[in-house]
Image (spheres, rainbow, N blue to C red):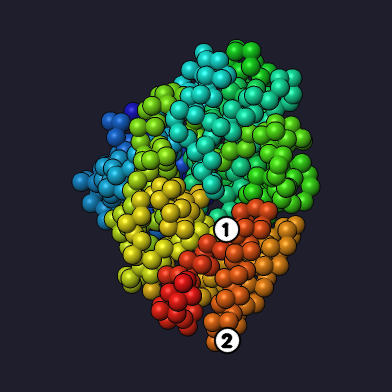
Amino acid sequence: MTLRIFIPRDAAAVSVGADEVASLISAAARKAGADVQVVRNGSRGMLWLEPLVEIERDGIRYGYGPVNPADVPALIKAGLLEGKLAAEIKSPLSIGVVDDHPYMKRQTRLTFARCGITDPVSLSDYRDHDGYKGLERALGMKPIEIVDEVAKSGLRGRGGAGFPTGIKWKTVHDTPMGQQKYIVCNADEGDSGTFADRMIMEGDPFLLIEGMTIAGIAVGATRGYIYLRSEYPHAQKALNAAIAAARKAGYLGPNVSGSGHAFELEVRMGAGAYVCGEETSLLESLEGRRGLVRAKPPLPAHKGLFGQPTVINNVLSLCAVPYIMAEGAKAYADYGMGRSRGTMPIQLAGNLKFGGLFETAFGITLGELVDAIGGGTLSGRPVKAVQVGGPLGAYFPRKLFDTPFDYEAFAARDGLIGHAGVVVFDDTAQMAKMARFAFDFCSVESCGKCTPCRIGSTRGRETMDKVMAGQNVEKNLAVIEDLCNTMKFGSLCALGGFTPYPVTSALTHFPEDFGRPAKKLAEAAE
């Protein structure tokens, strides 16, 4: 019987030697004449264990990690190619049954159910693990029924503001028939500490293809584009291979699965601009122009790509759709809390022992994520601040660790979930420097179209330099606060509008890092 050995092809695993490990194991198997199949799967998301090597016996997967190329000879000698397990190999790298690992057991994996399990570019693998069941059900429904199902699920955008997906789809669905409509996937994942989009595109690309196909049928769009971040060549390769396989099998093209619906899909690479994560700037880039933010209205749902009605959704939003269609809106909505329904793939990064991808229902607290799941800081020092939502997210101190992971709960404390990147800092972090970085980041990445963002970010960086030098601290901090107010309410898009979040949260929660006593801050607030 063929022994299957799984070694991730995910970029995170490749960056720490997964290709070399796979090559060494394959070569050893050939030399020994062993009946071994090396499967390049996606990552399970336990990034501190990469490269994670798994062997399958009797349908159960056993893991070893992190396996460096230097570890391979010892594992081979101990019997890896014979399918020996932890109790037989006695390796310190053994983690036992992978599904039983505490990090995996605590998750609710709906979107990432297949990631790390299947061969990402094998259509038969995808179908064998419930792939295309959502599309199959959708093809038996009227387009408006599909839209209603997504609306009832409570699915919201997994990017910035958490806008209800069903409303966006309904708007495009209701535009006059006869117009060319488009589905655009925003895969320009540029936030610091985020990698969920990359992981799902590299580890389960058919899921995104299925989600976009369902969206197209629901709103009457016959063409879709995946706007992919230029730094993701592994995802590009996986997506193109999966699109070719889906097209050959009839899941894409002029007659999707014999339904009479047409839907075609292609990948377009971005040019590296952070601002192109904003939907209208993305459209400009997709049309071949410089990525400049458009004024709204008109909304993309009315006048989007090439001036036509367009649905623009994040990768994770579209990847949630196949589960909703396969299992029903209620099955999805039963997870979560308040208006935040379903699950969220949360990315744990920064100064953390157990960094990786953790998918769970909305409602888990920030403290649980950092302390119980992430294991606290890798440095062993106390946690000082946690930034949620990328470089434009607020910094939360430990006293806010009781905040549940929920859109409204974060907003109530002047924070945002965004793409759910969680970056941890220990007590050596200097928050004035972090606030300066926010202004600097914005000034570098600004498209330059609106004055509050273009000028405000530059003046903010300059003024923060004066604060850090101890020059007229109170006066200059008053200027900072005024600049933040102008940027928040005057910028055309979230790049300028959200930059105040990290700045004002650092000022509020860490006044001592700005040479400003806490009592001074209270007086200023009054």
Residue 480, numbered circle: none
Q: What's the mark number on residue 472?
A: 2
Q: Nearer the viewer, mark 1 or mark 2?
A: 2
Residue 3 can be seen, yes or no: no
Q: Secondary structure at mark 1?
A: helix
Indicate left or right for 469 with 27 as reference. Answer: right
Q: Is residue 482 above or below residue 283?
A: below
Location of residue 324 (image quadrant): top left
Left or right: residue 173 compared with residue 40: right
Query: Percent from the top left, x then y, of residue 480?
Result: 59, 73
For the residue carrying disc 2, how many other residues have a C-alpha within 10 Å: few (<14), some (14-19), or many (20+)?
few
Name the residue: 70% across, 33% down: 302
- Occupied quadrant, residue 261: top right
Residue occupying the point 55% across, 15% down: 142
Tell me which residue sits at (47%, 83%) in the image: 515
The spot of residue 523 in percent (x, y) is 45, 76
- Left or right of 383? Residue 192 is right
- Expressed as whole percent of the image width and height from the top left, the position of residue 281 reads 70, 48
**The residue under label 2 is which amino acid type?**
Asn
